[in-house]
Amino acid sequence: MIDFEEIYTLYSPQVFRVCMGYVNDEEHAKDLTQETFISVWKNLPSFKQQAKISTWIFRIATNNCLRALETSKRRATSDLPLQVTDHKDESPDEKLAVLYRCISELEEVDRIIISLVLEDLPQADIADIVGISAVNIRVRIHRIKEKLAIKFKQYE
Amino acid sequence: MNNLDELRQIWRNTDTSSLPASADIILLVGKYRNKTLRKKFFLIVVAIILASLMFGAMARYDSAMLSTRIGEWLLIIAAAMLAWTNARSLPRFYRLENNTNRDFLLFLEKTRQNQHYFFRRTQVIALACCSAGLLLYMFELVHKNTNLTIIVYAALVVYLLLIWTVLRPRMFRKQSAKLNGLITKTESLLNQLK
């Protein structure tokens, strides 16, 4: 039997970061993380160990993110708080704010893919979560990296 | 900040200390489900009670007029439609989001289209049954007194006109705009997966 507390301790920071990558809003990301683990807790007894638990949890989390468009409108990119300065010697917090901002400017599915890449998930698992082929995922990751590189330059 | 490893390092700097404890999540489970489903269950229970009361009235009072019988059946049909459509949407709330993002979005799109159909067709039919049923059912009760008939029917017509010409169009516009927005958004997300 898998222990919920153990799962929560292990995966909640990861799920929170993925949700942050999607919504770029701390409170909203916390709500999404909470909803994800409520689903996990309710369905843990019926979870069959044929699938990896991480894939199962990230599927729930990313689908929650996709459904978030029903419950609240994402703040327009232009309204996002820009807490970064224009100089190159940025603090870790500033770098993180730039990273989240750049990710938030991507298309929704790209945000999910890059967040899962940054969580170090294998490409096969990402393909399994998103529902597109592993080859397609590889191409998408390459394109997302290019898009991000352009965005980073804008903030340098 | 172009290197993936460097990005990962920055990414992991995210402060997650404010996340609630696992025990708090377990405490929230019951509350969350109740809140989401309360309204749906309430509507189903109300519809079943209304239909049962109508069946009770049919058994208890032997109506002399055919209009009353037709009215009773129309009201029962309206209540049954309300209960059925709400009960049919319940699995959506119990469905675990353990699908791929693509399957989940397809499911959302289908659900939204069903809801759109409900607002455009099913709700109109149910409301028409309810209105006609009410008008027919009341006739036997008041027809012996002309003044009472005029007052009751004037009130009923005003009430039904208000529902059909003000409340429903307003609700329809609001719901329709919301659902169209959601369908468009879901389609755009599905396009991103092509």
Image: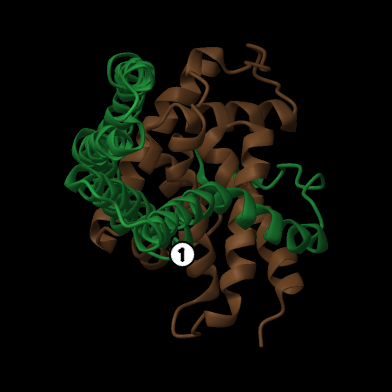
- Please tell me whether residue A129 is drawn above or below residue B155 in the rendered image: below
- Please tell me whether residue A93 is drawn above or below residue A42 in the rendered image: above
| Chain letter, disc 1 residue | B
Identified at 65% across, 43% down, the residue is A31
- Of residues B77 and A35, the one nearer the viewer is B77
- Quadrant in which residue A36 is drawn: bottom right
| Rendered location of residue A87, percent (x, y) | 66, 13
Question: Quick one: SS at disc 1?
Answer: loop
Q: Chain A is drawn in which colour?
A: brown
Q: Colour of chain B?
A: green
| Rendered location of residue B187, percent (x, y) | 24, 38
From the viewer's perspective, is A90 left or right of B99?
right
- Type of residue at label 1? Leu
Identified at 58% across, 51% down, the residue is B38
Identified at 30% across, 17% down, the residue is B161
Using the rendered image of the protein, determine whether residue B186 is visible from the camera's viewpoint: no
- Quadrant in which residue B176 is drawn: top left
